[in-house]
Image (spheres, rainbow, N blue to C red):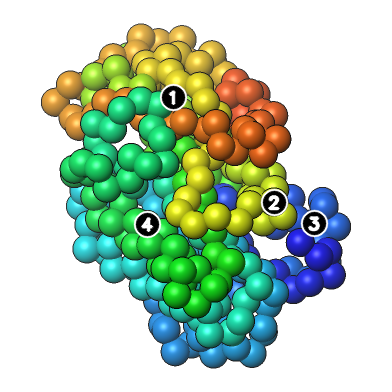
Amino acid sequence: MDLAAKIYVAGHRGMVGSAIVRAMRAAGHTAIVTRTSAELDLRDGTATRAFLAAEAPAYVIMAAARVGGIKYNSIAPYDFLYDNLMMSANVIEGARLAGVRKLLFLGSSCIYPKLAPQPIREDSLLSGPLETTNEAYAVAKIAGIKLCTHARAQYGCDFISAMPCNLYGLGDNFSLEHSHVLPAIIRKMHEAKLRGDPVLRLWGTGTPLREFLHADDLAEACLLLMDRYTEPGHINVGSGEELSIRQLAEIIAQVVGFTGRIEFDPAMPDGTPRKLMDVSRIRALGWRPRISLTEGIRGAYAWYLANSAEVRK
């Protein structure tokens, strides 16, 4: 990407979007365009198209999304489907009409079938039923992928899609109602430590296998893809390493300093039993993550401690 070219980052205040902005600034990009959700509601197609036409960015990175863990996805599926579908469609169509040079659409590994062969290759998309607990979010992200693919085929747009694995990092959502598994466990363990609880009970069986990637590593992958990748469909971005939720909880306990016993509640949902992505395509482009899981969790916990008063509001 041209360092002086205008780049619009949608969702710049979120964990992923803020990491992308940090990476772009570190790389020397000087014309980063942002808008808060209060300034621009991406669910409003007319406003989104007008904004992109007026700003005329050369590049767009679509990192805006309504996100949450299993519980939030389960209780608000319509909201997840509608909001993410509208935001994706409006930004992609607005970028097409504005003649954007290149767009990167960010999705999620939840797009893949619940029982996809492991590690999951990109061609597993739509090869089987989705995990029901996040089906609505997945459908919206699949629609975004297909919009990019068909915009390329029908209109010649250089629109690409990247599908990261489970993400975490600075600025994560630590809400006990809406967060993903890693930040939720950090907060629960920290509060259990402060109370002196002898036992902490977590959702599910602890056996599902997951892959985690720091948002700063994803941000570096995004910049590489904007510079070096131009193909239809989507590309996986992940660490290539997996561990069980129980193992994750044990690492977090060490970082947080929780010395109590960890128990799991099998009456609560587990989600997909295993989700490890095949990352051979992006590895072939020369990208590898730099931040180890333990190092990344230490940084995320430090951020939580520094911002816990705000997080609890």
Q: Which residue is mark 1?
A: 189
Asked whether residue 66 appears in the rendered view, the answer is no
Pick whichever, 147 or 39, lies toward us. 147
The amino acid on which the numbered mark 3 sits, given as a three-letter code, is Arg
Quarter of the image where one finds residue 226: bottom right
Q: Which residue is mark 3?
A: 25
The amino acid on which the numbered mark 1 sits, given as a three-letter code, is Met
Which comes sooner in the sequence, label 1 or label 4? 4
Q: Looking at the image, is mark 4 or mark 3 nearer the viewer?
A: 4
Pick whichever, 274 or 310, lies toward us. 274
Which comes sooner in the sequence, label 2 or label 1? 1
Q: Position of residue 279 (x, y in %)?
A: 52, 33
The amino acid on which the numbered mark 4 sits, given as a three-letter code, is Lys
> Which residue does the image show at 51% across and 50% down from the upper left?
162
Q: Tell me if label 1 and label 3 are in contact, CB under 8 Å.
A: no
Q: Looking at the image, is mark 2 or mark 1 nearer the viewer?
A: 2
Instruction: Identify whether 188 is placed above or below 160.
Output: above
Q: Looking at the image, is mark 1 or mark 3 nearer the viewer?
A: 3
Q: Looking at the image, is mark 4 or mark 2 nearer the viewer?
A: 2
Q: Position of residue 284 (x, y in %)?
A: 64, 34
Asked whether residue 227 appears in the rendered view, the answer is yes
Rounded to the nearest whole Å, what is the CA distance between mark 1 and mark 4?
32 Å
The amino acid on which the numbered mark 2 sits, given as a three-letter code, is Arg
Count of picture labels: 4
Q: Which residue is mark 4?
A: 141
Residue 111 has which mark? none
Q: Which residue is mark 2?
A: 228
Rounded to the nearest whole Å, what is the CA distance between mark 1 and mark 3?
34 Å
Would residue 301 be found to the left or right of residue 150 on screen? right
